[in-house]
Image (cartoon, rainbow, N blue to C red):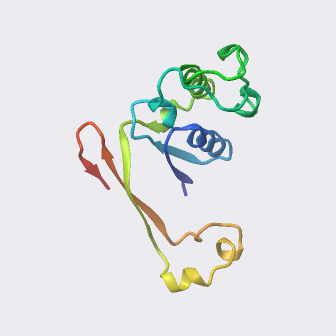
Amino acid sequence: MEKRVAIIGAGTSGLLACKYTLEKGFNPIVFEAEEGVGGLWRHTIEFTKLQTTISTYQFSDFLWHSFAKEESPNSQQVLHYLNSYVQRFSLFPYIKFNTKVMEVEYVGESSEEMETWELWGGNGRPFFSKGTWHIAVQDTKTFSIEK
């Protein structure tokens, strides 16, 4: 059975989730409503800067190095860093751009049965194997919805 994972958003957290699920043998798909990676960094004014130092806002396996010389890089430098991360770890094929998640629904066990589970069913596996997740997405260019 294919181990698929849906990730909503290609911001910092979504990119990390994509990389690490790939490393664990899953097949991720990142649904990103925008045309590029970066999340909220795509919507800041150019002179917006990190409010923390770069040492506290970097991937442990991909350091800032040449992306910024100052301790608080601006939004364009952050976007360049995030895009370089995606390129370095070949994540682009797993990102579906211009795709907005409209609805996520779990179809499987009854609510009553799920309430009896402890810590993800007690076996370390989420929702056993009976259920599935149904995701409805909208193409942000054509506004068509796919379920």
User: How many numbered tags mark residues here?
Assistant: 0
Q: Which of 74 and 82 is in front in this view?
A: 74
The quadrant where residue 14 appears: top right
Q: Is 52 situated left or right of 14 in this image? A: right
Report x, y in % for residue 102.
Answer: 35, 54
Q: Give the residue drawn at x 55%, y 25%.
A: 48
Which quarter of the rendered picture does the C terminus lie within?
Answer: bottom left
The quadrant where residue 122 appears: bottom right
Q: Which of 1 and 4 is in front in this view?
A: 4
Q: Is 15 situated left or right of 134 in this image? A: right
Q: Give the residue drawn at x 43%, y 40%.
A: 32
Res 38 visible: no
Res 62 visible: yes
Q: Which of 86 and 28 is in front in this view?
A: 86
> Is residue 21 depicted above or below 74 in this figure?
below
Which quarter of the rendered picture does the N terminus lie within?
Answer: bottom right
Report x, y in % for residue 85.
Answer: 62, 27
